[in-house]
Amino acid sequence: MQDFIFDKNFEAVHYTPYELTQKEFENCTFTDCDFTQAFFTGSTFVDCTFKNCNFKEAKVGHVSLRNVMFTDCNMTSVNFAMTDQVIYEFHFTNCLLDYAQFYKLKLKGIQFSNCSMVAVDFMETDLTEALFDNCNLRLAVFSNTNLQKADFYSSQNFSIDPDKNKLKKAIFSNENIKGLLDKFQIIIK
């Protein structure tokens, strides 16, 4: 595979572990591809879309994601903490992100729509203006996290300690506000 790939569609490709290192993809679409346990070290994705792809346990260290959309992807246990943070933007729709890690990332304005995010690590992450649209955040970890202006209105099962996170102007619904009171172990009827 060449080092720079532009404007190409990939369908139902099963990638070997080291096939995607040190590559640059621009304006590419990946559909039904399998990246299970693949290494993306040093790769760059610009204006790319991933649809119905499997990233389970993929290694995404030192990867650049610039205007990348993930839709209907399995990203269980992917550690995004080492992604390149220079000019980056990525969003998730209908994705399985259980046990993923976003530790210490600056993800201002990121969008998660209809995602399962069980036990996701958001410790020390900047999620200012993030959108959590209809997401299951059961056991997700929020500690020293910036959630200012984040929108949790339609999400559920989260537990966020207001004393350990920045929540100024964050948005919640009457139904899910109890996730801010868990530490008090009170019963709300």
Image: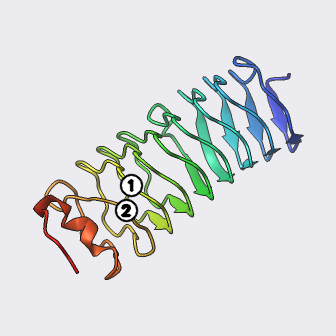
Q: Confirm or deny contact between disc 2 and disc 1 (CB under 8 A).
A: yes
The percent position of residue 140, horizontal first and vertical second, equals 36, 50
Task: Tell which of 30 and 52 is nearer to you.
Answer: 52
Image spot of residue 42 (x, y percent): 61, 24
Q: Is mark 1 on a helix, strand or loop?
A: loop
Q: Return the x and y of residue 50 as percentages of the image width and height.
A: 73, 47
Point out which mark residue 138 bears: 1
Q: Residue at x 66, y 51 (%)?
A: 70
Residue 38 sits in which quadrant? Answer: top right
The answer to which of 50 and 177 lies nearer the viewer is 177
The answer to whether 101 appears left or right of 126 in the picture is: right
Residue 182: quarter of image: bottom left
Q: Which mark is residue 157?
A: 2
Q: Which amino acid does label 2 sit on?
A: Asn
Is residue 166 depicted above or below 88 in this figure?
below
What amino acid is labelled 1 in the image? Arg
